[in-house]
Amino acid sequence: MLQRFFKIVGYKDKEADIRARVLYYHQIGYYAIGVRQSISERRRNKDTYLEILCGAEVRASARKRAPRKRPTRIRG
């Protein structure tokens, strides 16, 4: 799934595969060692993670596509 994402945003097959693996292994590592982060901490770090794990091109593309205003949450 992530490999397909990286191909869609323009990475060649081998680089898409390696980037996907790094992202999967990164997430598995977080679960394995029990890293805990608050939602606010994750939000503060999201741009840096996106750039490091996905590349500057993906970050720039994501910024262009991101909605200007956050959607309103519906509380039940």
Image: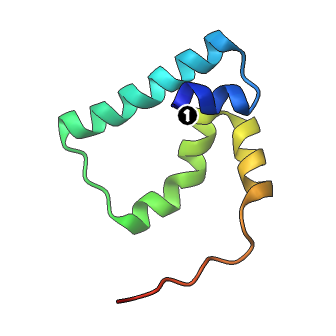
Residue at 63% across, 40% down: 51
Where residue 53 appears, as percent x and y from the top left, is 55, 34
Q: Dot 1 lies on which element? A: helix
Task: Give the amino acid type for the residue marked by disc 1 in the picture.
Answer: Leu
| Pointer 1 residue | 53
Circle 1: is it few (<14), some (14-19), or many (20+) Cα within 10 Å? some
Residue 14, position in %: x, y?
62, 10
Q: Position of residue 34 (x, y in %)?
A: 19, 43
Coloration mode: rainbow
Q: Is residue 25 shown left or right of residue 60?
A: left
Residue nearest the viewer, comparing 26 with 16: 16
61 on left or right of 25: right
Residue ID at (55%, 16%): 17
The residue shown at (80%, 56%) is: 64
Examine the rendered structure and indicate whether residue 42 appears above or below residue 26. Answer: below
Q: Quadrant of residue 8?
A: top right
**Residue 45 against residue 75 in the figure, above or below:** above
Q: Quadrant for residue 55, please give it.
A: top right
Question: Which residue shows up at 63% across the image and 76% down it?
Answer: 70
Give the percent coordinates (x, y) of residue 20: 51, 25
Residue 52, by quadrant, is top right
Residue 74 against residue 64 in the figure, above or below:
below
